[in-house]
């Protein structure tokens, strides 16, 4: 009788413990992913921003890459370490920023963001980036124009970029 009772307790206790372990692992991993996309806010150009003042950024006369994504999107998570590395490395050479559009969707309303991640790429002179033929043959870009004037207003890349691809784009914009 006592042995049967122990078996019944074990049947309940083992699945409950397994669920607790899985939930604990998920929370731990989720916290690690959140930390990957975090960076210090004391830099001149912090990585994480909640709004984009493009005119103010252009005043610095540096190339700009703004990544619109979300902390919980898989390709965005894959890009997070690249963004952290390049944001730190490129201070004073280029502006690399990240906007979580799931947390602040209004931050993307002035930009042609249809999917995440999407990067908006701007030259140091404030004009939309025009990739060289070499870069355009390996990385696909979307060019956006004003409907009335047909003036080129944005260059975007939809989807994730590798560190090498981002470095190629930055080098194409003159960043050494």
Image (cartoon, rainbow, N blue to C red):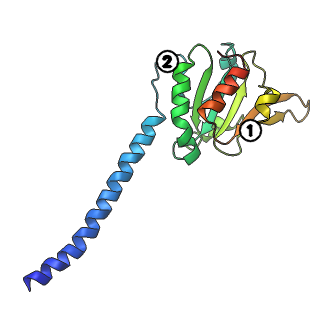
Query: At 71% across and 28% down in the image, what residue appears?
Result: 121
- Horizontally, is 66 left or right of 152 in the view? left
Instruction: In the displayed orientation, state which residue is furthest to the left.
Output: 2
Q: Is residue 42 above or below residue 139?
A: above
Q: Which mark is residue 101?
A: none
Judging depth in this view, the residue of 91 and 140 nearest the camera is 140
Q: Is residue 21 above or below residue 94?
A: below
Q: Which residue is mark 2?
A: 43
Residue visible at 72% across and 37% down?
157
In the rendered image, which quarter contains the C terminus? top right
Q: Is residue 75 visible?
A: yes
Mark 2 crowdedness (10 Å alpha carbons): few <14, some 14-19, many ≥20: few
Q: Is residue 125 above or below residue 4?
A: above
Asked whether the beta carbons under mark 2 and mark 1 sit within 8 Å of each other, the answer is no
Q: Find residue 2 and report its horizontal and vertical position in percent.
A: 8, 82
Residue to which mark 1 is pinned? 112
Q: Indicate the quadrant where residue 150 lies.
A: top right
Q: How many marks?
A: 2
Judged from this view, the residue extending furthest toward the bottom is: 1
The residue located at (74%, 36%) in the rendering is 139
> x and y percent of residue 171 in the render?
69, 21
């Amino acid at each position: 009788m006592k042995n049967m009772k122990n078996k019944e307790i074990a049947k309940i206790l083992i699945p409950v413990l397994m669920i607790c372990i899985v939930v604990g692992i998920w929370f731990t991993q989720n916290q690690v992913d959140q930390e990957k996309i975090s960076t210090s806010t004391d830099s001149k150009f912090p990585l994480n921003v909640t709004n984009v003042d493009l005119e103010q950024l252009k005043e610095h006369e540096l190339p700009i890459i703004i990544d619109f994504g979300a902390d919980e999107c898989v390709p965005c998570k894959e890009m997070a370490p690249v963004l952290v590395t390049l944001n730190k490395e490129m201070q004073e050479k280029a502006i690399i920023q990240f906007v979580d559009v799931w947390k602040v969707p209004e931050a993307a309303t002035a930009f042609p963001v249809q999917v995440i991640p999407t990067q908006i790429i701007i030259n140091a002179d404030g004009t939309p980036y025009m990739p060289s033929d070499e870069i355009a043959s390996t990385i696909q870009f979307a060019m956006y124009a004003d409907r009335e004037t047909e003036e080129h207003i944005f260059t975007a890349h939809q989807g994730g970029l590798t560190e090498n691809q981002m470095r190629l784009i930055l080098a194409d914009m003159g960043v050494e």
